[in-house]
Image: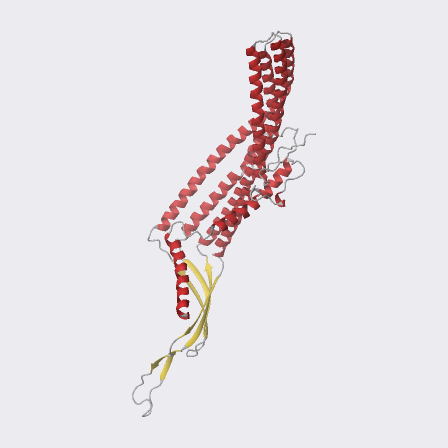
Amino acid sequence: MRAERLVLVVLGALGLAGCGLVAGLTRPEGDGGWSTARRAQELATRGEAAGVAYPQPTEEHATPAAPLTLADALALATRDNRRIAEAGKDLEAARERVWQARGRLLPDVTGSGRYARYTAARTTKVVLPPGLLPAGVTPPDVVVQEEAFGTLNGTLTVPLDLSGELRHALRAAQAGYRGEQARLWATTLDEQAAVVRGYFQLLETEHLRVVTEQRIAAQRRQLESAESRFNSGRLTKNELLVVQVTLRNVEQELVRRNLDIAEARWTLNRLIGLPVDAPTEVVDVASPPEVPPVDEALHDAWAHNPALVALVEEQQRLEATERSLVRSRLPRVSGGAAIDYSSATIVQPQEVGSGFVGFSWDLGTDGRREAEIAEARIGVERNRLAVEQEMRELEQGIRLSRQSVEERLTALSTAEVAVGQAEENLRIREQQFGVGRATSDDVLTAEAILAEQRAVLASALYQAHMRRAELQELIGLPVDGGSVTAAR
């Protein structure tokens, strides 16, 4: 009975294992492998590392106590930004591909061993010419394989890259690594530029909220004056309603400004690795960005733009790959040494060494290699076109970004003058409204003009810094915010 129960347990275990194996081999989604709890645990672990709301962020992701400067935000992004970290892992993988290509040029050592035990030794009878042995003597049995013995074999193979196929493959892998370095730098610049945009968008939205609050204060004063005139019979009901509706619209605009601030703060927190809902504060800026001359910007871009550098490295990788494929038409030569040992004593010596030189030659009769060579050559030509297109787009982008910075700086200087003029215009209209020489529409128009100029003044400086960051990204130089100094 015990034996039967043991057999049943073993059969049950084998059945369960078989069900899992069958599920893994027959279902397109597999058998899962992870339970629901395991998946939840993985998300919890990753969420803690990411600093999201669930689970709660750890002390490692605590919000900085002091307001962030732009330099602090860029440093946090370099350390904690996930996209930059992913690109870093891609670079590590490219390094390993270089080691793989290099390994094809290095000696390859293989070893094998085996111990065998047979049911009996193998023997053979020796057939001798008649009369060779004395009468009555039986011919001896000769053992050709012992009942038990072990063997060890070791082989050292050195590739003799006479054709250059392996060297060109290594150069292709190294070019791929350099291209991955350029792509890492491109990702870093892209995220840095995004940090700069998020930083100044937060400042811009905060200042626009101040402008909206100023409009609300002015609208409420205007409403009080309009209600006073309406009660005294000097203002129509329609004019009062216009003032009331305008105030409600501006109050709704304040709600939208608060949402814009929250969105800008969430974006900045995500980019620099802080908890998304952290109450991050940033330091204001006062100085305009510095803009390089267009010729200098283009000269630096041809040498430093990471997208262009990556394409140039890709060009070298493709050409080296094509050369490696062409060289594979030639024989592959290798040499080396081997050693063989057997514990069997029927053959002497038990340990034998050897040296060898040989070759293998794929004649390519199936046509696959020639198709690969043709495809590689097409890739080379296509990449050349991509380089030309990238250079054209790069020049256009640099010229546009630089002009955009100058346009925003011009708008800033214009708004600085226009705000004063709009304030004086509003003051005059309010005085005229008080004595009945202007309507509510006149005051509201003057107030809207002032709000528009204040909004331009609040936005132009920050937008100029954003455009300058885009220009730096196109040039390929580190994004530093344009020599920003903190506002006092």
Q: Examine the rendered structure and indicate whether residue 236 appears above or below residue 86.
A: above
Residue 228 in view: yes
Q: Quadrant of the C terminus?
A: top right
Q: Residue at x 43, y 59 (%)?
A: 333
Residue 164 in view: no
Q: Quadrant of the N terminus?
A: bottom left
Q: Residue at x 55, y 21 (%)?
A: 249
Q: Examine the rendered structure and indicate whether residue 93 appears above or below residue 420.
A: below
- Which residue is at the far left? 130
- Res. 291 image quadrant: top right
Q: Position of residue 367 (x, y in %)?
A: 34, 50
> Is 36 situated left or right of 478 in this image?
left
Q: Position of residue 457 (x, y in %)?
A: 62, 23
Q: How is the image coloured?
A: secondary structure
- Which residue is at the far front? 1
Q: Position of residue 91 (x, y in %)?
A: 53, 47
- Comparing 391 with 33, the one in front is 33
- Comparing 227 with 473, the one in front is 227
- Res. 206 image quadrant: top right
Q: Examine the rendered structure and indicate whether residue 112 appears above or below residue 366.
A: below
